[in-house]
Image: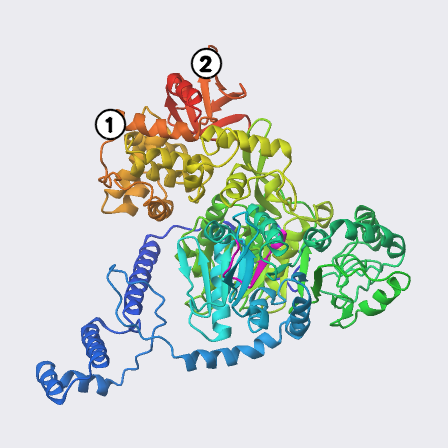
Amino acid sequence: MPDFPFNDGLTNAKLIPANIFTTPPKSKPQGRRQRKKAEWEEKNKLRAAQRAAEGLPPYVPDREVEFLRKKRQRETQRHQSPPTMSQREERRAKTGRHEEQANVKKKRKIEPSNGEFPLLDGGLPGPVVRPQREQLKAQAVRLEPLRAKLPIWEHQGAIRAALREKDVLVMLGETGSGKSTQIGQFLVKEKWMDRRRVSIPSGNGDGKDKEVMVGGCIAITQPRRVAAINLARRVAQEVGCHLGEEVGYSVRFDNKSSEKTQIKFLTDGMLLQEMLHDPLLKRYSAVVVDEAHERTVGTDLVIGFLRGLVYGKRKGLKVIVMSATLEVEKMVLFFEKERDAALAFIKSKEGRSRGKEKNVVEVNGNEDGKVNDGKLSNGIEKGEGRKKRKRKRKKDEGAPWINGNPYDRKSDKKDPSPPLVNGESKGSIEGSGSSNRSSSENLDTDDEKYDGTVAAFKVPGRQFPVDIYHTPEPVLDYVEAALKTVFQLHCEEPLPGDILVFLTGQEEIEALQKQIEDYAQSMGKNVPQILVLPLYSALPPGLQQRVFQPAHEKKTRKVILSTNIAETSVTVPGVCYVVDCGKVKTKQYRPRIGLESLLITPISKSSALQRAGRAGREAPGKCYRLYTERDFIPLADTTVPEILRCDVASSILMLKARGQEEVFAFDYLDSPGREALEKGFEHLCTLGALDMSGRINGLGHKMAKLPLVPALARVLVAAAEPEVNCLHEAIDIIAALSVENILLTPTGDEKREQMEEARKEFDRREGDHIMLLTLVREYESQQQKKAWAEKHFVSHRAMQNLLDVRKQLKQYTTHFTSSSSPPPMPAATVTPDLAARILKCFLKGFLHNTARLVPDGSYKTVIGNHVIAIHPSSVLFGKRVEAIVYHEFVYTTRAFARGVSAVEMGWIEEGFVGGG
């Protein structure tokens, strides 16, 4: 049996049976039992959802459901119009009292439902019994002692004081400090939160002001919808209210908020969407940008808009930017009103600050920074650590650490000193050995303090320590190493304690899930069971929520396989062990050749710290990194902002649609560069979203309202035109292109031959787009969808996700045309004329993704004249056609076009002549 990656990480390790890493024997009875168990669980879930939708407990037998429905109807009628005595007697004569007496004898306790399940039959829900306000308040009282243990709790007064004095607060808080759940509750009772009347410029150019009502709600943005939903649920429990009342959330296609909502969690994309209708964000008194270190495109645009509002038309709006691994210096300087004065103060201060800083290294949760036996506690020799710190100081020269009094350099980012707000000490850490107050006094003896417009605050300490282990040697296959580490932990570490594994994508997650489930079947009866749960963005929301629920069976350990979706904000209950592969999928865009590719790259140090912090949320934890300590040292400190490594056409369209016509003059936290912006302008002009002067037109406004990249949005707008009339077909194809891994690729020659034979009925000479449309129609026409998908090597889960995406897109396109085409019939034949109309629509969005056949048999792109080949997964692979249009350009061993369809060269010429 091969060695485990962490032989020195666990003490008293016992040998694991050798059959764990051998192929488990196949057992037909065992497979039947598992299928029956899965069917039984699915049936129980459906019944529980139906019962909950009607306000009934999930365990009520079917024979009592009708009686309880009638009883609820009687109670509803009684509340609407109190019945007279004669009416009561008539009702008793009709229904009889024996049913009520039988129910009383059974003394069955009927628990109220929270009413959060939708009614499955699509009808109007009846009156649902919800928990009483007293019950929710009692729950909030029980949770308050847990809140008081959070590190941020003792600093709430200092945070309030900072925001009373300043409009912008940049806060650095360690993972697990409680900042995401508590910041809204700390601020909701402040006086500046009250809804009030203010004067703002009218915008008519007459110089007059107009009065509007603003405030009353706090917006807390999250980079991902999973984090927004789960944080809102947790905060609603702590506040003691129903979700959607005082506390709510808003994500794409799901809104649980109301006029009463005071704390609202939402994705940064939803906040940008709200700015289309309310550019001044009049509903909000404060906006909190959480997990700002992720630097998504949405986060950067939100931060840029907020700076313009704070010093522009929305004076008095409070802005809080926070993260666990934030570049505080950069963020404070960005939000500073007088940047020139701030930079001048920094230069005059640097000389004295440089010689007085003190470095404290925190290793494995040890805050005293002590070193034993010439080595740090994670195995780095003392000399290496000292060299690393020296290099870091040299790198950061000219960018002082800002902590409290914004331009006093105190220490590097690992200094666990007490937080300061405008120069005042507000906290302490045990074992720090020094105070920030004394350091501040020493630095400011010769210079007066610079009183800027931004307050900075640091919340020290995490709730529980995390021990970090690295592999002694590099691993060749991190998926295999993750498999061994999971079973090493499962067999040696006691319960409770779930395992969270970070991988790069859906393919790796599904492959590792199958391996773990196969190996787990061969384990002995005395070994606890394993419940493997995937978590990635393409997973339906209902399946995503399973990772936050406890295992139904006792003596079962959850193993969550996740992408970086679980890296920030999300607390997965029960996780004590984290396995970090050290890799992540990132987009890379080269504007010169127009190539955007998805590559697996090493993570940054900030991401590594965030992943390790997932293990210390509820108890002391351990993080196992599948890379060496030597490989960790050269990692980048922070993740490269997404806006610097992606196509900025979507960003330009967002800015234009929200009134920012001067895109080059927008206040970017990191500007994408002139070349990338010019390429984005060129792309949008080709699509027809901008006019010749660069201003957004009506077509551009339509495209900006769709949650799609500009190219796909242009396709939908073109398909909705009356003379084309293929909107439903275009939605089906775009939904299929938006879902990953629809077509499965089996291993083994025999399986591959079966796959090719089964998929022959989908082959279309037009190409992949029409093939996907045929596949969707055929899938919908089947009664036994899952069995059909298995036979044709199609992912049933991906197809279900496709149907969900299609439903959402139809909601967005209802306003496109008043006379839309009737919904297509399932499995309808796609005629050549319909296929031509569909492909012409895709040409309007992907005119820049076209290639022509050259005499040597290869293809060259129409724009750029680059050689490109059809991907082997395409139905056109090995065929020669006049010209092609493709969905994406990828580079592996060579440049490939994926999602390819055949078009005529005359169609491409018409597109260029017509200007898109």
Give the total number of marks visible in the rendering. Answer: 2
Segment colored magenta: 280-293
Q: Give how far across and how far down residue 770 sits, in percent.
A: 32, 31
- Of circles 2 and 1, the one toward us is 1
Q: SS for tag 1?
A: loop
Q: Which residue is mark 2?
A: 857
Q: Earlier in the sequence, mark 2 or mark 1?
A: 1
Cα separation, mark 2 vs mark 1, equals 29 Å
Q: Residue at x 25, y 59 (%)?
A: 122
As displayed, is residue 832 above or below residue 205? above
As displayed, is residue 840 above or below residue 728? above
Q: Give how far across and how far down residue 402 sits, in percent.
A: 76, 58
Q: Give how far across and how far down residue 633 sits, in percent.
A: 74, 48
Q: SS for tag 2?
A: loop
Q: Which residue is mark 1?
A: 831
Is label 2 in contact with label 1 (beta carbons under 8 Å)? no
Quadrant hosting residue 819: top left
Quarter of the image with the C terminus is top left
As displayed, is residue 195 above or below residue 138? above
